Image (cartoon, rainbow, N blue to C red):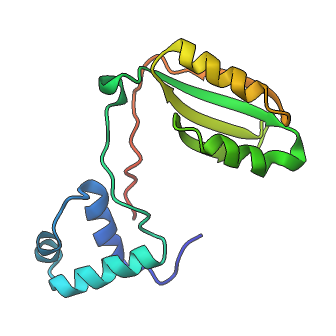
Amino acid sequence: MLDKNIDELDKKILNELIENPRVTYRELARKLGVSVGTVHLRIRKLQAKGVIKGFTVQVDYGKVGYDVTALILIKVDGKHILNVERDVAKHSNVCAVYDVTGEFDVIVVAKFRSIRELNDFIKSLLAKPYIVSTNTSIALNVVKEDFKLKIP
């Protein structure tokens, strides 16, 4: 939901941080034509509101051994969706859990070192009492994997 208290300066700060989360407050202030104190206060405000959830790096997971990216669709016994989502989200290989519409209830994006590791994960899902079925697709090639969406 859109926070109406996010102004143009906040958006500029967010876009700069999205592009380079390592930028210093001093560099950011110079680029935006405001004081370092203003940048500091705005970023703290955005963090307090939960707009900025953290600062991170982008990793090429294939280069650190995670060659298998799987999109796992899960059909859940309806009244247990939240519990299943929370449980699945705790797994260290899981990158994202989405509550979705359609034939399936949940989509999971996860990365694995091998097909065997993925297979073990799928079997562990199917052993859970409220998971009705799964449908897994393996990404053959990553064309784009970038969540740095610019804020207009």
Instruction: Judge left or right: residue 144 versus residue 83.
Output: left
Residue occupying the far top of the picture: 116
Q: Residue at x 80, y 34 (%)?
A: 75
Q: Quadrant of residue 32?
A: bottom left
Q: Which residue is drawn at 29% across and 71% down?
A: 13
Q: In the rendered image of this protein, does residue 142 appear above or below residue 107?
A: above
| Image spot of residue 72 (x, y percent) | 65, 29
Q: In which quarter of the image is the C terminus?
A: bottom left
- Report the front residue among 5 and 106: 106
| Image spot of residue 142 (x, y percent) | 41, 25
Q: Is residue 99 visible?
A: no
Instruction: Judge left or right: residue 7 versus residue 27.
Output: right
| Image spot of residue 79 (x, y percent) | 89, 49
- Report the front residue among 74 and 143: 74
Q: Residue at x 25, y 80 (%)?
A: 40
Q: Residue at x 26, y 58 (%)?
A: 21
| Image spot of residue 34 (x, y percent) | 17, 84
Instruction: Judge left or right: residue 53 versus residue 74.
Output: left
Q: Is residue 116 visible?
A: yes
- Count all numbered tags in the image, as a single digit: 0
Q: Quadrant of the N terminus?
A: bottom right
